[in-house]
Amino acid sequence: MNTYTCIKTYIPKPGIGIVQLHRPEVLNALSLQTMIEIVDALQYFDNQSDIRCMIIHGSDKAFAAGADITEMSDAGTIDMLERDQFSRWEKIRLLKKPLIGAISGYALGGGCELAMHCDMLIASETAQFGQPEINLGVMPGAGGTQRLTRIVGKAQAMEMALTGRMISAYEAWRLGLVNRVVPVSGYLQEAIALATEIASKAPIAIRLIKESVLKSYSTTLEAGLEFERKNFYMLFASEDQKEGMKAFIEKRKPTWNNS
Ligand code: CAA
C-alpha cells in the first residue's frame, strides 16, 4: 500500500479495510491530494482478496467539510477542467466490495457527496449533512444534484441545494439518506459491526448483490430485473451456492470459500 499524507488506513479486524480522512486542521476538507489518496486506498482494499468490506470515516467533528475551498478559490474553468478532481470519484462507484460510511459531524458539499458514494451510512447523532455550495456562489459538482435527488426526492434536494441549509442526522435518517443514527461514542463500532456481519457472508453473492442494487440507479426496471435474474442464475455456478443450500438442509452453518 502507498504512503499517504491526507488519510490513514487500517484493518481493525480481519476482512475489514478502513480509510480515515485525516486533515483535522481544515475539518477534512477534500483537497485534490486527499481525493487521489481516498480512491487509491479504496481501490487497494477492493483488490485484496482477504478484505470483504470497507469503511470510510473522518473525525467525530467532521467527516468532511467539502472540497478544499482555499485550493479552488483562485482556479479558472480551465484549471478545474484539467484537474477534473471529481470525475476520479467514479472509481468509487465502481468498487466491487461494499463501502460503509461512518459519518460524524459535518458532511458538507463534497463531503456529503462522498458520503453518498457509500453503499450504506451509519451516522452519529452529531452528523450534519448539507450542500452549501450556493453560499459560495457555486453549485454541487460531485453528485449533490443527482444522487441526493434520487435518494431524498426532488423537493428536499432542491431545498438543500438552493438554501445550503444543513439537515440533522435524524432528518437524514427520516429522508432515507442514512441507515441509522447512533450515539457519537458508538458510530464507528456500529459501522465495524455491520461490516463484520457483511464480511461473514458469501463473497461472490455480496458482489453481485451490490452490482444489482446499483444497477437500479442507471437502468429501466425491465433491464434491471433481467440483470438481477441473470446474476441470480449465475450464482448457481458457484460452490458457495452449493455449500449454502446444503448447509441449510443439514442444519449447520455454511463455510464460504469464495468460489
Ligand atoms: N475548505 C478549506 N478549508 C476549510 C473548509 C473547506 N471546505 N471547511 C473548513 N475549513 C477550515 C476553515 O477555514 C478553518 O481554517 P482556519 O482554522 O485556518 O481558519 C478550519 O477549517 C475550521 O473551520 P471553521 O473555523 O470555519 O469551523 P466552524 O466550526 O466555525 O465551522 C463549518 C464549520 C460550518 C463546516 C465551516 O467551516 C464551513 O462552512 N466550511 C465550509 C463548508 C462548505 O462550504 N463546503 C462546500 C465546499 S465546495 C464543494 O464541496 C464543491 C463540491 O460540491 C464539488
Image (cartoon, rainbow, N blue to C red):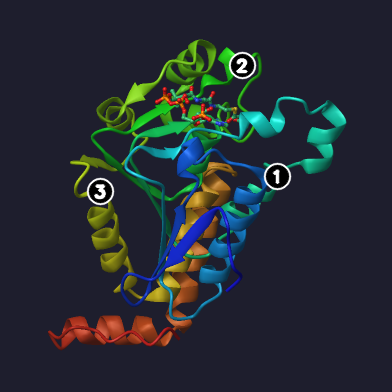
Q: Is residue 206 left or right of residue 81?
A: left
State the mark number for residue 87. Answer: 1
Q: Amino acid at mark 3?
A: Tyr
Which residue corresponds to the image point at 48% horizontal and 39% vertical from the top-left?
25
x and y percentages locating residue 124 in the rendered image: 26, 40
In the image as oriented, which residue stretches furthest toward the front?
25
Residue 3 in the image: x percent, y percent? 59, 68
Q: Residue furthest top?
A: 163
Q: Amino acid at mark 1?
A: Ser
Work out which residue is located at the far left of the displayed protein and give it. 251
Residue type at tag 2: Leu
Of residues 130 and 23, the one drawn nearer to the viewer in this rendering: 23
Cα distance between the residues tagged 2 and 1: 21 Å
Q: What secondary structure is found at the residue carrying circle 3?
A: helix
Q: Nearer the viewer, residue 252 or 9?
A: 9
Mark 3 within 8 Å of ligand 1, using the beta carbon: no
Which tag, 3 or 1, sits closer to the chain's start?
1
Residue on which the image places disc 3: 187
Image position of 227 with respect to 183: above or below: below
SS at mark 1 in the image:
helix
Q: What residue is at 61 percent from the left and 16 percent from the top?
A: 136
